[in-house]
Image (tube, rainbow, N blue to C red):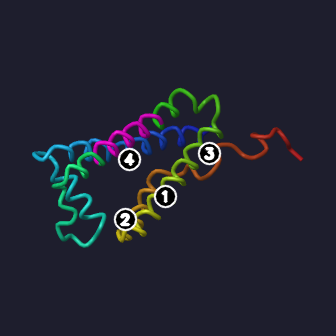
């Protein structure tokens, strides 16, 4: 039971980490407010050299899409923690791990192939923050299957 409480709490941490990037990116759609988003991307694409410029409308559009997806994904994780986790502990835990795994692989692959490999290193930190203790089942295998032999 203690691990289940930890998982539910950590899912809220995960939700905040995931969704926390969304408003920053959404503000990147407005030139008067896009400096934090531009600086964040500059940091992720190390070294700090002013790239990307965040001047192109295409970047603003991608910021809007990405910000919306991240907030939506974070809200979904939060909702799973409060409305579904108790009824389907392992299914929710595995769903989080699979979704984060797909994000990590695709985001890191795209970062590397686009020449922005430092972001793949940052992704390791984000992966760790989102997964936390969720990598371990909330219950022992015998309590999940009911098999004691």
Q: Quadrant of the N terminus?
A: top right
Residue 91 picture location, percent across and down: 64, 39
Label whose residue precedes the other's in the sequence (3 or 1) = 3
Label whose residue precedes the other's in the sequence (4 or 2) = 4
Disc 4/disc 2 C-alpha distance (Å): 16 Å
Q: Residue furthest right?
A: 149
Disc 3/disc 1 C-alpha distance (Å): 18 Å
Disc 4/disc 3 C-alpha distance (Å): 18 Å
**Picture layout, residue 116 above or below residue 36:** below
Q: Which of label 4 and label 2 is nearer to you?
A: 2
Please check the rendered image and state whether residue 74 is part of the magenta-colored stretch, yes or no: yes
Residue 54 picture location, percent across and down: 19, 56
* Stretch in magenta: 63-76
The secondary element bearing badge 3 is classed as: helix
In this view, the residue in front, 74 or 51, is 51
What residue is pinned by disc 2? 119
**Picture layout, residue 113 above or below residue 59:** below
What residue is pinned by disc 3? 94
Q: Residues within 10 Å of mark 2 (few under 14, many from 20)?
A: many
* Left or right of residue 90, residue 127 in this image: left
Q: Residue at x 80, y 40 (%)?
A: 145
Q: Residues within 10 Å of mark 4 (few under 14, many from 20)?
A: some
What residue is pinned by disc 4? 17
Residue 9 picture location, percent across and down: 48, 39
Q: Which of label 3 and label 1 is nearer to you?
A: 1
Label whose residue precedes the other's in the sequence (1 or 4) = 4
Label whose residue precedes the other's in the sequence (2 or 3) = 3
Determine contact: label 4, label 2, CB under 8 Å.
no
* Left or right of residue 57, residue 9 in this image: right
Q: Residue at x 64, y 43 (%)?
A: 138
What residue is pinned by disc 1? 106
Label whose residue precedes the other's in the sequence (1 or 2) = 1
């Amino acid at each position: 039971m203690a691990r289940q409480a930890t998982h539910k709490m950590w899912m809220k941490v995960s939700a905040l980490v995931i969704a926390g990037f969304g408003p920053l990116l959404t503000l990147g759609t407005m030139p008067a407010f896009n400096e934090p988003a531009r600086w964040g991307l500059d940091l992720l694409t190390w070294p700090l050299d002013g790239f990307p410029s965040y001047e192109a409308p295409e970047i603003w559009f991608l910021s809007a899409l990405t910000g919306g997806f991240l907030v939506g994904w974070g809200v979904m994780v939060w909702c799973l923690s409060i409305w579904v986790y108790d009824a389907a502990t392992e299914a929710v835990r595995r769903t989080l791990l699979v979704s984060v795994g797909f994000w990590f692989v695709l985001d890191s692959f795209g970062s590397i192939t686009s020449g922005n490999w430092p972001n793949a290193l940052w992704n390791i930190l984000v992966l760790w923050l989102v997964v936390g203790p969720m990598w371990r089942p909330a219950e022992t295998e015998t309590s999940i299957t009911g098999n004691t032999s």
